[in-house]
Image (cartoon, helix red, strand yellow):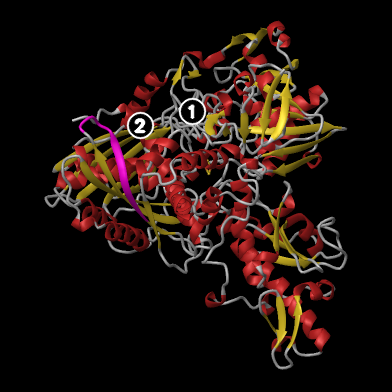
Amino acid sequence: MIEIVNVSRRGVLQGLMSAGALVIAARFYPESLRAETASRGTHADAATLHANLFVGVNTDGIVYLVAHRSEMGTTSRTSLPLIVADELDADWKKVRIEQAIGDARYGSQNTDGSHSIREFYPAMREAGATARLMLVQAAAQQWSVPASECHTDLHTVVHPKTGRKAGYGELAAAASKLPVPKKEELQFKTRGEWRYVGKGMPSYDLEDLCTGKAGFGMDARVDGMVYASIARPPVFGGKVKSYDDKAALKVTGVRQTVAIDPFQPPPAFQPLGGVAVIADNTWAAMQGRRKLQITWDHGANESYNSDQFKKELQETARKPGKLIRNEGDVEAAFAKGGKVVEADYYVPLLAHASMEPPVALADFRDGKVTIWAPTQDPQGVQETVAKAVGIAKENVTCHVTLLGGGFGRKSKADFVAEAAVLSKKVGRPVKVVWSREDDIQFDYYNAVAAMYMKAALDANGKPTAWLQRSAFTPITSIFDVTAVYGAPRHLQQGWTDVPFDIPNLRVENGPAKPAVRIGWLRAVANIYHAFAVQSFTDELAHAAGRDPLEYLLDLIGSPRILNLKDTNYPNYDASYEAYPFDTGRLRRVAEIAAEKSGWRNRKPRKGIGWGIAVHRSFLTYAASVVQVEVSDKGEIRIPRVDTAVDAGLVVNPESTRAQFEGAAVFGTSIARTGEITVKDGAVEQSNFDDYPVARIDEAPLHTNVYIVDSSAPPAGVGEPGVPPFIPAFCNAIFAATGKRVRELPLSRNNLSA
Amino acid sequence: MIRLRVNGTDRSFDGDPEMPLLWYLRDVLGLTGTKFGCGMALCGACTVHQNGDAIRSCVTPMSAAAGSEIRTIEDLNKTGLHPVQRAWMQVNVPQCGYCQSGQIMQAAALLSKKPNPTDQDIEAAMAGNICRCGTYQRIRAAIKAAAEAKP
Ligand code: FES
Ligand code: FES
């Protein structure tokens, strides 16, 4: 539900706009708030409370669009304004994008879950169409002609009958005095009239990113700031027993040390505690921190070891768990005999390792804090920081810098709260810089997961029964320390919605208790769920002696809407009517990826293999065919990947292709070497030497991305490429070597001949 | 006192000679185009040119930078964009962009030595530069485009 108001005279974009500029605010209500907001207060109240974007047309013709979502490489900062600009019929060259600070009036700013475009597409269109109509009405009034006789042509209103024209800048002042037209009056462009949507634009920041001028969180500077490096408790939940900072204070440039309190459970996004070294530059802070002598109280997690935990998790997955979905009666079908296939899959903890480590600059003065941070969630920053320093969240101003990658890590504000706490104690602006070691060792890791799969096959090799059980350390444990089961919003990610047409089907989930912080990483639970489901499908195809593609299509069955009524299925917070799980679309991407790759003409031979997998996540359907070469020594090359994507309406095809190319590389990193392990409670990895990510000679040489032309509503593009890639890659390795990968990463598997 | 030239300007430094060049550039001179990614010569985000060679500034102490000519992304080209930067824009390489200063400096050094690099040359030269967003295939394409565009 969207409402548009004229806020030209409220000074909302003061400083940016000259007097007389037209400024439109679009208020957007999420579905869930609809009932509530309808009965609440006046329109004006609602406007200032819920405006989520501003369109400003200045008298000089410059159009200012406020980007309220964070930019971390997915071009949301470009693509959302692009939708407004298109409906406004604006000249992109005259558009300036301003990054919003954290403010609840913008609606949700949490740039997570691949839903920026999906959630804000209608609001952006209405904002643009409204401003355009007001400009048209202003021109019509001036010319004393009916508005219906006027139209726009790239930043200009035109009246063809008299040949009159006026630029948006000339009309802004008059338009700003008009009432906002009703939604029924708006005329949206037809698809054929779009200038930008569906065609795309390079990132607004492209040149700055190529010249070193772009401002990331790491680059934030203010006068008088000092730098901090923090020694945090190596074991999660531990605390400082005592420390000696004499040697640290002798380091040139070090000013002081500050103890940070441990968190009070549940951890949520609180700082972990520890000892900070404050210095004149980053290097001095890091050197000083190395010289700290700290005695730790490691706490309850000291006995935790990944090896042991893995065994327990696998045992849990083999035992009956909590019922998530049930069709027919798998046990009865298993009892009938036939060929039964079983397999266990395992995916370890994974770290985000965004290229820019967590970093934040905070300036606490007079009971207020100003923040500059590469955050995915500026409102989350306001909340977390306010709690950490004991002020109201209205007194936290969060400036959002560009993000040097986020992948989910930077929606947690622990590192920002550290900077605020230190600035309060030190009385100066403090920039907290995480080293790569800090980043790898104090992450919110993607869950460690064990999956147990069992199927009974009929004489044709088709499953008559399918049982899948999982156990993974739940993200909800950071908010509720007693949580051990997967939440519906994580089970939905490729587990509850296993899309196969099998009469007896059962989905279960078992308990798991983590000893590190668990969080969401690009594609989240879809990573391990798709790995198990799509690898097992490939195993069954081989067991049945069938072509993996044909077999996969057989299991998906005929095109239909998956009936998930009897399950708890949040559908990524979208309505199931607008975004049903359509197996026809799932089939189609698999078919397209297969056809474009030349699947049916492939000639597998020793050392060369092809694999396929398909998966729906974040309301997008994606399939990958991966080709691999595996040498006798077990070295892997990935010469080609073909990915087909149905993401509904695609606003920016160029950046969408880039997201899927990148997802293949991200998936390569997870599959080849992604593994965080814990020994005696502490994370063992620390940098790119022991937590390697794919390099140019390890990544796929070429990823082709095929975007399905679709008029379905827009869906996610940042994450959905990751889940199908990994099983497709592992299925290809099986085709090349005959070795089935059931445990990630590949570095744990011996692939040599 | 350590003397060096940074982007054509003479500089002197009397702090800790062990301080890596990276932090001198970023924290002391405010040249933040050069990035910190690992601090251990593992990722290439901090790549700059020393006397025309690509080096990792995060492991180059100021004592080793003494007397040399350092060039950073801010001054890759005296006027306008370097052919590598133009190619990077044409191919739309960056996603988040954080690694790209380092990638561009590495690629520019490669092309100055090998104007027509083979695929193997590109892999060998660029394997030390991580891009977590996974822009590698565009990096390859951009290096080739830059090589072709060169006079
Ligand atoms: S920061 Fe220098 S190589 Fe990574
Ligand atoms: S573009 Fe994000 S790390 Fe390379």
Chain letter, disc 2 residue: A
**Badge 2: how crowded within 10 Å, few (<14), some, or many (20+)?**
some
Q: Quadrant of the C terminus of chain A?
A: top left
- Look at mark 1 in the image and give the residue it sits on: B42
Is A503 left, or right, of A576 in this rendering? left
Say which amino acid is labelled 1.
Answer: Leu
Which segment did they paint magenta?
A: A632-643
Rendering coords of residue A115 (x, y %) = 55, 53
Q: Which mark is residue B74?
A: none
Q: Quadrant of residue A453?
A: top left
Determine the secondary structure under disc 2. Answer: loop
What is the crowding at mark 1: few (fewer than 14 residues within 10 Å), some, or many (at least 20)? many
Whether the residues at callouts 1 and 2 have beta carbons within 8 Å, the answer is no
Q: Position of residue A611 (x, y in %)?
A: 27, 47
Pick the front one: A542 or A358: A358
As drawn, B36 above or below B78: above
Q: Quadrant of ligand 1?
A: top right
CA gap between label 1 and label 2 equals 21 Å
> Which residue is identified by label 2?
A745
Considering depth in this image, is A244 or A567 the residue closer to the camera? Answer: A244
Q: Nearer the viewer, residue A633 or B151?
A: B151
